[in-house]
Image (cartoon, grey):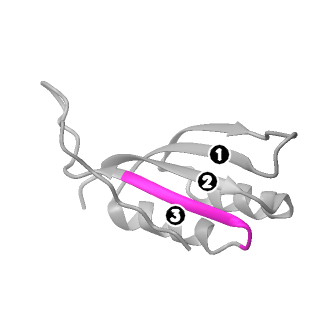
Amino acid sequence: MEKRIGTITLLIADRSQSAQVNAIISEFADIVLARQGLPLQARPVAVISLIVEGSTDRINTICGRLGRLPGVEAKAVVTRTAPIAQGSPDKSIHKYCKSH
């Protein structure tokens, strides 16, 4: 299956889910290229953004598992086609959102 590059954004309203979020992200470490977390202590939500590269099945699986946690929203955006190894980057982007 071809690999795609994308992002997953997590909005975490229930911080007690942090351990489960981190455990799931660790399970999918093979597709996570980068992670940025903003705890936003003064606000009722924390934000985590992930840059991922993997099959749509793997990206859907991590996004779905994260989005099913209580108090966690997960959205993914992935490229429509596999990235071009050489030459100009693929300019077609397909929004692939999954909200649970």
SS type, badge 1: strand
Rendered location of residue 59, percent (x, y) = 43, 60
Q: Is residue 11 above or below residue 37?
A: below
Residue pointed to by mark 3:
63
- When asked about the image quadrant of residue 84, the answer is top left
Question: In this rendering, would 61 be left or right of 92?
Answer: right
Left or right relative to 1: residue 43: right
Q: Which residues are magenta?
A: 70-77
- Please, what secondary structure does the residue beneath circle 2 have? strand
Please name the residue shown 24% across and 55% down the image: 2
Q: Are marks 1 and 2 in contact (CB under 8 Å)?
A: yes
Marked residue nearer the N-terminal end (1 or 3):
1
Magenta highlight: main SS? strand
Q: Residue at x 37, y 68 (%)?
A: 57
Q: Quadrant of residue 89?
A: top left
Label placed on residue 64: none
Task: Name the kind of residue labelled 1 in the image.
Answer: Ile
From the viewer's perspective, is 59 left or right of 41? left
